[in-house]
Image (cartoon, grey):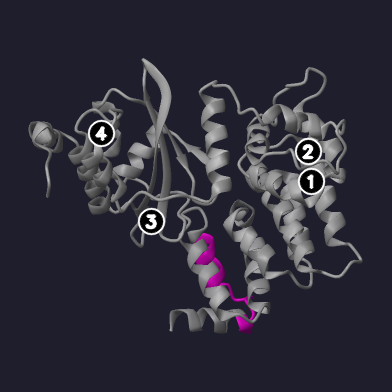
Amino acid sequence: MHIFPNLLTNYYGLMDTIDTITQLLQSSNSQYRLYDVGRKIAKISKEQFEKIEQNQIPYPTPSQGHACIAIAFWQKQSPQPYLWLLKLPLDERGLLNQGARNHFIAIIVEALGADLTQDANEQQEELLKNNPYLFTPAQYKLAALNSKIKFELKQTPSEYLAPFISYITGDTGWENWQAVGVQGITDFAVRINENINGTAKNSELLSKALPHLPNEVLLPLCSALENEPLAVELLEALITLFKAKLSSQEPATEQMIQVQQHLLRSLASSCQHPHVHQLISLLLQQQTLAADLLITLSGRCWLALENSDNLMAFFEHVIASKEQTLFNHIFKDLVAIPALRPIVFQCMRAPERSDALSKAIGQLFN
C-alpha cells in the first residue's frame, strides 16, 4: 500500500477511529445527503443509512446484488457539493458487505486523509480513480440526480429549464422540440409540484401538454418523472395516455411497447396510489404482456406487487413468456427486496399456483 508521507499520521489515526462512511463524513465536518440510485433515485435518510451500515437492516432497494448510493457532501463555507457514486456488494440477506465498505473507506482515507474536499494531486487522483467501488450510472440518471441535488440545496437550475417550460405551454409548437435539453426536462421533473410560470402548477401544465408530446420528449420526461411522487391530475393524465396506447388498434410495434414501458415508469414513485394500483391490477388481467413491461413492473413498480394476488398474476405472466432465464432473473431480483421477500415465498408455496409456475420454480432451484 502506497501511503503519502504527509498523510501517514492521518491515515493510521483515522483508520483507528473510523468504522463507517457516516463517521468518515462527520470526521471531515461535511454536510451531506444520501440517495439510492439503483432502481430509481430516492433519498436515504441519515438515520436509515446508519442502520444499513451497522447491518441492523438490509438495504431496502438492492439492484443486482448491490447497494447503489450517491453521496453529495460539502463544507459549510463552500456549498458546491462533491459527489461519490458507490456500488457496494450485499450478502444473500441484503446486508451491506462490511469488508467492501471498509476497503472503500481505507482507499478514501489513504488518498485524502481527513479533508475529503481538498483538491487532490496527481497521485491522489490516481488512487481515487482506481477505487473499485465507484461507478458511473446512466447519463439520464446523472442528469436527474444533478437536478435533484441542486433543487434540494436551493441552487439555480440549469439554463435549459426555461426553454422546456416554454415548450410545454405549446407556445413554440410541439414539433419544435429540438431545443429541449435532457437537463431541462429533469430540472422540470424535480419541480413538478411547484408553480414556476405563475399561472398554473407544473403538473397542470404537463397534464394538458401530454397528448401533444412527441416521443423524443415524452420518453426522457417519463424517465425523469419516475423519481417523483405525482399529483392526482397528472397521474390521471398519464394513466389515460397509457390506457390509450394499450388499447390502440395499431400493431404492437417495438416503438409502441417502448412508449408503454416509459409511461409505466413515470408512475414508479406513485405506484402505491389507488389509481396506479388499480391500473396495474388491470394490466395483470391482460391475456399477454410484453416482456419489457414485466421488467419495468419488477424494476420500477415493485411496490405495486406487494400483495400476493398481484405478485402471483405477475409471475404467471412471466412464465407465459416461456423464457426460463427471464423468470430466473426476475425471481432473484424480487426475492432480494426485503419488502417483497415474504410475499415471494408465499407465492412459491401457494397451492393455487399453476403447474407451469411450479415447474419454473423447480428449475430455478435445480
Residue hosting label 1? 238
Q: Secondary structure at mark 1?
A: helix
> Could you tell me the amino acid type at mark 1?
Leu
**Gap between marks 3 and 2, in whole Å?**
35 Å
> Could you tell me the amino acid type at mark 3?
Gly
Where residue 358 sits: x, y (%)?
Answer: 56, 81
Q: Main secondary structure of the magenta part?
A: helix
Q: Which residues are magenta?
A: 342-356
Query: CB atoms at circles 1 and 4 under 8 Å apart?
Result: no
- Label located before the other in sequence (3 or 2): 3
Residue 181 lies within the magenta run: no
Q: Image quarter for residue 327?
A: bottom right
**Gap between marks 2 and 4, in whole Å?**
41 Å
Residue hosting label 3? 94
Outermost residue on the front side: it is 122
Q: Is residue 204 left or right of residue 56?
A: right
Residue hosting label 4? 24
- Label located before the other in sequence (4 or 3): 4
Residue 266, numbered circle: none
Q: Is residue 216 above or below residue 326?
A: above
Query: CB atoms at circles 1 and 2 under 8 Å apart?
Result: yes
Where residue 52 sits: x, y (%)?
Answer: 35, 44
Quarter in which the C terminus is drawn: bottom left
Residue, x 29% and y 31% (percent of image)? 25
**Gap between marks 1 and 4, in whole Å?**
43 Å
Residue, x 63% and y 32% (percent of image)? 187
**Callout 4 environment at 10 Å: few (<14), some (14 to 19), or many (20+)?**
many
Q: Secondary structure at mark 4?
A: helix
Residue hosting label 2? 234
